[in-house]
Amino acid sequence: MSDKPEKLITDDGLRLDGRRADEIRPMKIEIGVLSRADGSCYLEWGRNKILVGVFGPREAHPRRSQRADTAVIRYKYNMASFSVEDRARPGPSRRSIEISKVSREAFEPVIMAELFPKTAIDIFVEVLQADAGTRTAAINASSVALADAGIPMKGLITSCAFGKIDGKIVLDLNKDEDNYGDADFPVAMTQDGEITLVQMDGHLTPEEIREGLELVKKGCKEILEIQQAVLRKKFETPMGELAEEA
Ligand code: ADP
């Protein structure tokens, strides 16, 4: 781990990686990267690298996990052991189980699961490289992978965190800011701005939360545009051109 920097944000409002308070890290999305998945997405956000595969709707196994009136949505967040500086212990942890649960819940309001009784929709997240904000990155990637799989949704989910560094509210913390900052507040929302995930690590006043949520709305709007652009490109490309690209 790097040593604590003297300042995380300069008097001119510049952060260690040159961003301003209201800027997200650069994001790059590729769609349809796994041939055996029904939908997939590879996403880079700053130094985070995330791969998501979506499978289904398919018959749910074991049978006792089936529900007669709806599909079950399963979300599995996993960190590769090489994804962090000190090797991450393989297998589920309290942290990965918690992230999987809240991320699944972030999608439940938009996935039209009632159309597919007795089936399962599986979302597998592999964090290949982590640099803070992996749960938000994974949600953004999962949203695109679900759309790639053709799962009917009321809209996309986008996710972004705000945090507090040197007493200032900023968007999308990187690892140093997460390590040495005062608070981190991940959020996910629908296209209409309805919040489907909120978590908080650290202490924030109601006024700081209001300020942070305004930043998050701006961040999510930018992310939604990136997600929509990549989906539009895929679904607007005539089949002939896709065959030529392959
Ligand atoms: P998020 O990645 O969603 O911000 P956390 O706040 O729990 O989730 O983690 C912040 C960062 O801490 C991660 O992105 C990762 O870089 C690092 N981290 C998380 N778990 C581990 C671990 N087991 N070993 C080393 N670093 C970790």
Image (tube, rainbow, N blue to C red):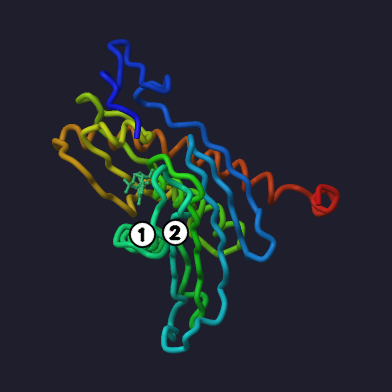
Residue type at numbered disc 2: Asn
Asked if the residue at label 1 sits under 8 Å from ligand 1, the reply is no
Q: Is residue 211 left or right of residue 129?
A: left
Find residue 125 and report its horizontal and vertical position in percent: 49, 58
Distance between the alpha carbons at the discs numbered 1 and 2: 6 Å
Find residue 150 and report its horizontal and vertical position in percent: 61, 62
Q: Nearer the viewer, residue 21 or 157?
A: 21
Where disc 2 sits, the SS reads strand
Q: Nearer the viewer, residue 226 or 32?
A: 32
Q: Nearer the viewer, residue 216 or 178?
A: 178
For the residues labelled 1 and 2, say whether their Cβ atoms are less than 8 Å apart: yes
The picture quadrant where one finds residue 218 is top left
Name the residue located 27 percent from the left edge and 26 percent from the top edge: 4
Viewport quadrant of the N terminus: top left
Q: Is residue 187 left or right of residue 145?
A: left
Name the residue located 48 percent from the left edge and 49 percent from the top edge: 82
Name the residue located 42 percent from the left edge and 45 percent from the top edge: 84
Image height check: is 13 above or below 181? above
Where disc 1 sits, the SS reads helix
Q: Residues within 10 Å of mark 1 (few under 14, many from 20)?
A: some
Asked if the residue at label 2 sits under 8 Å from ligand 1, the reply is no
Find residue 205 and report its horizontal and vertical position in percent: 14, 35
Q: Residues within 10 Å of mark 2 (few under 14, many from 20)?
A: many
Residue type at numbered disc 1: Ser
Image height check: is 227 above or below 175? below
In the image, farthest residue toward the bottom: 64
Q: Would you name the residue on which mark 2 appears? A: 78
Which disc is residue 60 wearing? none
Mark 1 or mark 2, which has the lower sequence index?
A: 2
Q: Would you name the residue on which mark 1 appears? A: 96
Find residue 211 and report its horizontal and vertical position in percent: 24, 31
Q: Nearer the viewer, residue 58 or 111?
A: 58
